[in-house]
Image (tube, helix red, strand yellow):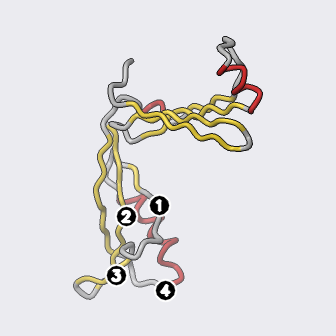
Amino acid sequence: MKLEDGRITTLFNDDGLTIELHDSKANTQFAKIKLTPTQVTKAFSRLGYVECSIELFGLERVGLKHENKKFEFILPVISYTEEKKIAKELVIKRCPKGWVPDLFFNSQDSFFDKDGKRWARTTIRRWR
């Protein structure tokens, strides 16, 4: 597989070097490579097969197109202190098939009133 729209981020700090690989079409980071200062020195001196830590994730999304949209739903009559908990439970149940909901309900626009009812709003995502 070849990614035409791949992205790379390199982060240097006292612990060494971190390299992150991204598929921008899928809006997914899929690899994180960590090297200690000693490993960085070896790699930059053109030594081959330098040991490093590699973490892979989100590979099932690589090469797919990321889509997202807002998802709004009515909440039952509940106390303010229960809103986030109930919203997380309901969005999992009500989210359309094939979509994955963000379970973050801390934005200013996460909860609102409309037509005399309390509503919740989050982002849902899918990759195809």
Q: CA distance from mark 2 to mark 3?
A: 14 Å
Instruction: Using a 10 Å C-alpha cutoff, classify the residue at mark 4 as few (fewer than 14 neighbours), some (14 to 19) or many (20 or more).
Output: few
Residue at the spot of label 4? 79
Callout 1 secondary element = loop
- The mark nearer the N terminus, 2 or 1, is 1
Q: Residue at x 29, y 46 (%)?
A: 67
Residue 19 versus residue 89: which sits nearer the camera? Answer: 19
Measured along the vertical axis of the image, is residue 26 above or below residue 95? above
Residue at the spot of label 2? 122
Q: Is residue 41 left or right of residue 64?
A: right
Q: Amino acid at mark 2?
A: Thr
Callout 3 secondary element = strand
Kindly identify which numbered label has been placed on residue 118: 3
Q: Nearer the viewer, mark 1 or mark 4?
A: 1
Q: Estimate the x, y position of residue 13 in percent, counting from the top left.
A: 68, 44
Residue at the spot of label 1? 103
Q: CA distance from mark 3 to mark 4?
A: 11 Å
Q: Which quarter of the rendering shows the N terminus?
A: top left
Q: Estimate the x, y position of residue 106 in percent, counting from the top left.
A: 47, 71
Check if mark 3's residue and mark 4's residue have beta carbons within 8 Å. Answer: no
Q: Amino acid at mark 4?
A: Ser
Instruction: Using a 10 Å C-alpha cutoff, classify the residue at mark 2 as few (fewer than 14 neighbours), some (14 to 19) or many (20 or more).
Output: many
Measured along the vertical axis of the image, is residue 104 above or below residue 110? above
Callout 4 secondary element = loop
- Toward which corner of the image does residue 2 lie, by quadrant? top left
Q: CA distance from mark 1 to mark 3?
A: 18 Å
Q: Residue at x 73, y 43 (%)?
A: 14
Q: CA distance from mark 2 to mark 1?
A: 7 Å
Q: Estimate the x, y position of residue 80 in percent, counting from the top left.
A: 48, 85
